[in-house]
């Protein structure tokens, strides 16, 4: 499958997920959000699960792409990470958060989804750990265990997702919690190096 | 409805949720977990949603009941809070976490569920804020803003729930994250007053 077709199908999947949620989603819904026919999509993806696997892979790649390509230093790298996590990638991100929560709820029944959520979690923790290690080594951040910081941050990020869906809270609330934690633990501030 | 019947229906609902999850759950499933007939349950609850509302109310009451009734001090009160949150109330709690996540995913569509999740969240934050205020005022805890501590803890608790369901992580991981945070922020330790 050429990458243009893949891109179109996966973008359409994102829009269809916002519209319909996960449970009700059909290949037909996705086709309706694209220039492709149901048959054309089925040609590339046998099942809804296969398509959602590709969609989750796409989500991880998209996240990676929003991390700092060439950061000035660990402080900027951390800021870029938070931007990548907390800035809505697209319109209708509230609806997308709901659909993503439905997908996470399916993970106990769908090992392939669980694998991908674990991979995304691993990438996030890795990015934070590496950044904090750099920062403590160079003296930009206060001395602290990078693994502990990474665990805190991803746990809070997960929590923010639930709060957005279950409580209707804005993502900015959790962003403030995470920034407050990083400020207290590392001496880092959102504006840049102290 | 007498409280014994209510208790039986709600306990049966908990077991049925573990068995079937939320989406597939029917009144018939709940009846099968109890000594009551489907008709008898329907007599008390018109719809599945009404029943789940009562179930969520029951969950909040149950949580309240597990908080420290007469704590020796803020340190013990905090320990009791963490016990109430992180100790599985019953067997099959992994399956229950999955069903509860499904319910949280429904909150955007079901205002009555959202109201209850907000109420539970408010109670948790209130308990932490009050406990931390007492602790800082009496010098047992280091000086810190109780509201900030409360926000972090409930966000982490929510995060732990997602991690359990989506990643298959044990709740002990998040408990460690929260205890580490409280130790660093308050000088509190799980064993009791420092």
Image (spheres, coloured by chain):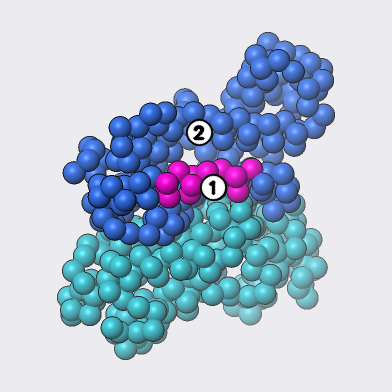
Chain colours: A blue, B cyan
Say whether residue A36 is left or right of residue B177.
right
Q: Quadrant of the N terminus of chain A?
A: top right
Label pair 1/2, CB-CB below 8 angstroms: no
Q: Nearer the viewer, residue A87 or A3?
A: A3
Question: Which residue is the site of mark 1?
Answer: A121
Going from N to C along the chain, the mark reached first, 1 or 2, is: 2
- The chain containing the residue under callout 2 comes to A
- Residue lying at 78% horizontally and 22% vertically, measured from the top left: A44
Res. B188 in view: yes
- Residue lying at 54% horizontally and 34% vertically, measured from the top left: A96
Say whether residue B88 is left or right of residue A86.
right
- Residue lying at 35% horizontally and 46% vertically, measured from the top left: A134
Give the residues in magenta.
Answer: A116-130
Say whether residue B185 is left or right of residue A60.
left
Give residue A41's position: percent from left, percent from top.
76, 20
- The chain containing the residue under callout 1 comes to A
Question: Which residue is the site of mark 2?
Answer: A63
- Does residue A119 show up magenta in the picture? yes
Q: Are marks 1 and 2 on the same chain?
A: yes
């Amino acid at each position: 499958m050429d990458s243009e077709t893949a891109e179109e199908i996966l973008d359409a999947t994102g829009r269809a997920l916002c519209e319909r949620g996960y449970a009700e989603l059909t290949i037909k819904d996705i086709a309706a959000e694209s220039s492709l026919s149901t048959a054309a999509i089925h040609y590339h993806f046998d099942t809804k699960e296969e398509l959602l696997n590709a969609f989750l892979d796409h989500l991880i790649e998209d996240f990676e792409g929003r991390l700092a390509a060439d950061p000035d230093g660990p402080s900027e790298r951390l800021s870029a990470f938070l931007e990548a996590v907390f800035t809505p990638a697209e319109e209708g991100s509230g609806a997308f958060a709901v659909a993503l929560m439905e997908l996470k709820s399916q993970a106990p029944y769908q090992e392939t989804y669980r694998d991908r959520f674990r991979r995304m979690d691993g990438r996030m923790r890795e990015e934070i750990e590496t950044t904090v290690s750099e920062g403590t080594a160079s003296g930009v951040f206060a001395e602290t265990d990078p693994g502990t910081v990474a665990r805190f941050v991803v746990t809070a990020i997960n929590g923010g997702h639930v709060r957005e869906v279950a409580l209707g809270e804005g993502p900015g609330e959790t962003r403030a919690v995470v920034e407050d934690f990083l400020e207290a633990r590392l001496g880092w501030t959102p504006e840049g190096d102290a």
